[in-house]
Image (cartoon, rainbow, N blue to C red):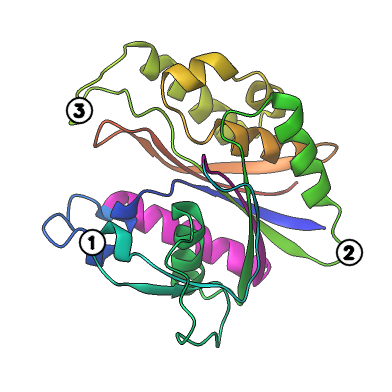
């Protein structure tokens, strides 16, 4: 059974070692993500995570250890307490690394990460969430995904539709509106480079049939990318 949900983005800038010259500028979103993680860990230290990744679709077990070396710093993260650093996988996807980093910051015991196609259909994403919800133990659900990267900012490819799209995401996460999440447009998300759409729709599948209290901890696009942080608990 899913006992709580934390929704977070997964940019490398969450990790202070990767943004040595801009730690203060990234502090607000980092603080919100860690706060969401700690709230989830207070409900369960055993996590499942869901995220979209364009290259790897599958399950990363909790015994994995990875590194942010590909993002500039050899920062080691593990998906479970007590995991050694002797067998580091240099190819773990970014959302898996972010899940491991947040697990460590929040004090969770372990996280198993399911990555799915970020441009997959609504029904495919929903079915993954429904499957994740069929757990015989209490688990926290960590949902990782960014909003549009086409907001005005350093990306250099602004699209005015990004503001409205991320506003819809913000409102859906702030109110636990499952229908609104399932109604997010797949093609428009691809055009706006929204990496989190499939994961948010998997959340809708996982949360179906239950009432939830939602709280939005952060929603902004400080670097031209939409980032949303929310916590859901059973009502």
> Label 2 vs label 3: CA separation?
44 Å
Does 104 sit above or below residue 200? below
Q: Which of the two residues, 20 or 175, is positioned nearer the viewer here?
A: 20
Q: Label 2, on which residue? A: 136
* In this view, the mark in front (1 or 3): 1
Q: Which mark is residue 100?
A: none
> Residue 70's spot in the image, x, y percent?
31, 60
Q: Residue at x 68, y 55 (%)?
A: 4
- Provide the residue span drawn in magenta: 28-54
Does 154 sit above or below residue 103? above
Quadrant of res 64: bottom right
> Residue 226's spot in the image, x, y percent?
37, 33
Q: Label 1, on which residue? A: 72
> Label 1 vs label 3: CA separation?
22 Å
Secondary structure beneath disc 2? Answer: loop
Q: Residue at x 61, y 42 (%)?
A: 214
What residue occupies the far top of the structure in this picture?
160
Secondary structure beneath disc 3? Answer: loop
């Amino acid at each position: 059974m899913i006992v709580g949900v934390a929704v977070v983005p997964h940019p490398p800038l969450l990790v202070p070692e990767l943004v040595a010259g801009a730690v203060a500028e990234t502090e607000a979103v980092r603080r919100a993500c860690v706060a969401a993680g700690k709230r989830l860990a207070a409900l369960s230290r055993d996590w499942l995570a869901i995220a979209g990744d364009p290259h790897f679709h599958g399950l990363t077990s909790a015994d994995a250890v990875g590194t942010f070396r590909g993002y500039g710093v050899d920062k080691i993260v593990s998906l479970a307490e007590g995991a050694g650093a002797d067998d580091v996988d240099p190819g773990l996807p970014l959302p898996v690394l972010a899940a491991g980093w947040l697990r460590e910051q929040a004090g969770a015991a372990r996280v198993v990460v399911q990555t799915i196609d970020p441009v997959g259909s609504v029904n495919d994403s929903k079915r993954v969430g429904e499957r994740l919800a069929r757990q015989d133990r209490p688990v926290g659900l960590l949902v990782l995904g960014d909003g549009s990267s086409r907001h005005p900012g350093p990306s250099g490819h602004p699209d005015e539709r990004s503001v409205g799209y991320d506003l819809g995401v913000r409102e859906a996460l702030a109110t636990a509106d499952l229908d609104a999440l399932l109604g997010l447009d797949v093609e428009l998300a691809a055009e706006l480079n929204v990496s989190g759409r499939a994961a948010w729709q998997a959340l809708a599948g996982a949360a179906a049939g239950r009432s939830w209290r939602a709280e939005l901890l952060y929603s902004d696009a400080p670097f031209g990318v939409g980032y949303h942080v929310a916590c859901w608990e059973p009502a």
